[in-house]
Image: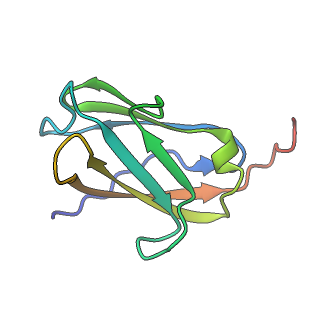
Amino acid sequence: MSVAIVEGPAILIGYAYRLDLETEAPLFPQAAELVAQVRLKPSAPDVLATLRTQDGTLMRQSDCLLSLTIPAHDTSRFEPGSVVLDMARIDASPALPLGFLLEIPVMLPVTRGLL
């Protein structure tokens, strides 16, 4: 697997997070059912959030574009630092990992506790 570092937005604790992922290869075909687990690090036993195409937190835009959303109720449980996630297709048998890992910084916002 090759490594590429791309600048992007940090997750702000307590706020919904949205990111569009664009790939060179067609990783997101129309019938794909995708799942992503968010953890503190790849070896962490606890899943902080689970994202799925079935609930709209992973939304296919095209074969090469996917929108990812982590709801505010999930980010409110994150700690400052970073989280990691990868994705797998679960419509294939056996499940098929997509072959990339994201590490996203997590920050405590100045404006918080509004609700």
The colour scheme applied to this rendered structure is: rainbow
Note whether 112 is above or below 59 in the view shown. Answer: below
Question: Left or right: where does residue 114 sit relative to residue 76?
Answer: right
Q: Which residue is drawn at 17% across and 54% down?
A: 94
Report the side of 70 relative to 96 (left or right). Answer: right
Quarter of the image with the N terminus in it: bottom left
Image coordinates of residue 50 in percent, x first then y, are 49, 49
Q: Residue at point 16% right, 49% down?
A: 93
x then y, percent, for residue 63: 19, 28
In the rendered picture of this protein, how many numbered marks are placed on residues?
Answer: 0
Front residue of 7/27: it is 27
Q: In this view, does 81 lie above or below 69?
A: below
Residue 64 position by quadrant: top left
Instruction: Name the image quarter holding residue 43.
Output: bottom left
| Residue pictured at 54% horizontal, 52% vertical | 49
Up-down relation of residue 49 to residue 64 (above or below): below
Residue lying at the far left in this picture: please name it: 25
Residue shown at 67%/63% (left/top)? 79
